[in-house]
Image (cartoon, helix red, strand yellow):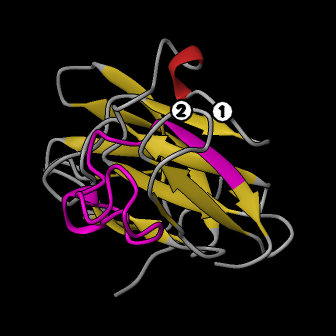
Amino acid sequence: MVYSLNPGGIKGGFAHDRIDVDQVFVPLGCVATVTITELTGVKHSIYWPGNWDKLGSDQTVEVTGFSCHDGYVYAWDNIWNDDNYANFSCRWLDDDYNWGDNCGNFRNRASAVQNNSAHNNSINLYFHPNLTSAWACPGPGSVWRDLRYNYFNHGSGRDGYTWAMNDEIASSKWVSSC
């Protein structure tokens, strides 16, 4: 059986709940603003990338809103999978020549990214600041949840070419296509 969860709604994974919802779907091309509450009462407010995510049996989730194609590129500080949610995220609306001056220095911290372009643009993610070096190019709506398996695959011969992107992004630029 599938249940939906509207913004502001709460359904849980606690064992004593009448409805036990173990997965949440965020539409592709969207990022959800959510609050995760642990059985202990500890709350975490974070952005969730598009796609299915699993909840622990000791968690509930409150979805407070969706941002769909809002024009931002989002980055998370941890690999994003069913066993690991990122603790911290950052987002950029415009080109950024140095991710080191945002969100408490996000340079070389991203382990997951999502292109939430509002105009069907791709985004170049660079190995060095100032849009120099090799780059990778997530297309519109792309969600790369584990940057250990995504590589700087553009800019042959430049510094960082073929390196895994995990904890290595330093700048970004919106482009019309890869």
Q: Nearer the viewer, residue 124 or 144?
A: 124
Provide residue 48's location: percent of width, then percent of height: 47, 51
Residue 119, quarter of the rendered image = bottom right
**Magenta run includes residue 165:** yes
Residue in front for this viewpoint, 41 or 79: 79
**Over which residues does the magenta segment extend?**
145-173
**Residue 164 in the image: above or below residue 52:** above
Quarter of the figure with the C terminus? bottom right
Q: Nearer the viewer, residue 153 or 56?
A: 153
Q: Residue at x 26, y 60 (%)?
A: 146
Which residue matches tag 2?
129
Q: Quadrant of residue 121?
A: bottom right
* Helix, strand or loop status at disc 2: loop
How far apart in space, not on screen, are marks 1 and 2 (Cα)? 6 Å
The residue that appears at 34% across and 88% down in the rendered structure is: 1
- Badge 1 local density, few (<14 within 10 Å), some, or many (20+)? some
CB under 8 Å between callouts 1 and 2? yes
- Residue 8 visible in the picture: no
Q: Is residue 158 magenta?
A: yes
Q: For mark 1, what is the residue?
A: 97
> Can residue 94 be seen here?
yes
Which kind of residue does numbered mark 1 sit on? Answer: Tyr
Q: Measuring 58% from the left and 15% from the top, which residue is drawn there?
A: 101
| Position above or below: 154 against 14 | below
The secondary element bearing badge 1 is classed as loop
Q: Is residue 20 above or below residue 95?
A: below
